[in-house]
Amino acid sequence: MQDVLRRELKYRIPEKSFSHIKSGLSYLLEEDAHNNGEGYMVRSLYFDTLTNDDFYDKQAGIDHRKKIRLRIYDTDDDHAKLELKDKQGVFQRKRSLEVSRAEAEELIGGHYECLMEKGDFGRRMYALMGTEVYRPVCTVQYERLAYISPTNDIRITFDKRLMSNEGNADLFDRDMPFYPAGVIGGITMEVKYNHFLMSYIKDMIDRADKMQVSSSKYCQCRLYGLGGAINE
């Protein structure tokens, strides 16, 4: 089980700023090992309660809120990550647990018993997802380019081509159809760090043409199912 607590800042940036920041960061930070030149795919299946509490908590701006998702990086993956993200004031806590492909398919089908064999965090997730009746509601996919620095666990990501499917919960479906979500052609820059952001990185980001936002990919992607009103 992985447990990460850090600050997360989100910005919407134009293509021109993206090219400039990307060029600078390539000298200052290491590329994520999965970048593969132009980035990598991220696909997540989000779960929510029968009354969509997590969606509406985000829309209402509640300080302490959560999201539950299964995440993969390739439809041929033989495993997935079950992740719980807790918003705690200005910090985001993310706990993740690796599950096999077969176990992921069990979770998608509403069978959470396999989590009982996954230690304390797995048992907590079993109780949470069962008691609050979580079920899969939305598949989200986008392309990500990431840069990292071990100092203060700094991670800067650029996400684009955000897409959604609210009717297909088969996370591993290679041919899943998607519709575009969020701002067409938009790029989201996420700046994540512990303690403080190094000044030379902060200076570069501050010079960029950007607009800070708080909307989540999950909320943007529930465009049709729940009306798509996004708070920023």
Image (cartoon, helix red, strand yellow):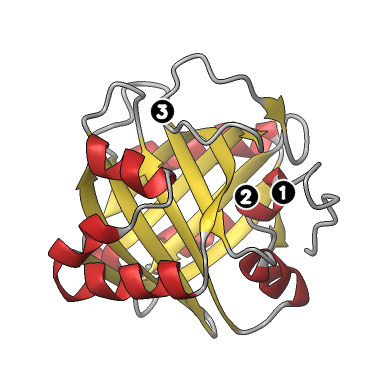
Mark 2, secondary structure of its residue:
helix
Determine the residue positioned at 82% across, 50% down.
228
Residue pushed farthest top? 175
Determine the residue positioned at 30% across, 76% down.
124
Viewer-proximal residue among 224 and 61: 224
CA distance separating discs 2 and 3: 18 Å
Instruction: Residue 115: name its quadrant.
Output: bottom left
- Judged left or right of residue 24, residue 63 is right
Determine the residue positioned at 40% across, 65% down.
84
Q: Amino acid at mark 3?
A: Gly
Where does residue 194 sit, x and y in percent of width and height? 34, 74
User: Are the two marked residues, 1 and 2, in contact with CB atoms closer than 8 angstroms?
Assistant: yes
Determine the residue positioned at 73% across, 36% down.
181
Q: Which residue is mark 2?
A: 217
> Callout 3: few (<14), some (14-19), or many (20+) C-alpha neighbours within 10 Å?
some
Q: Up-down: is 89 above or below 137?
A: below
Q: Which residue is mark 1?
A: 220
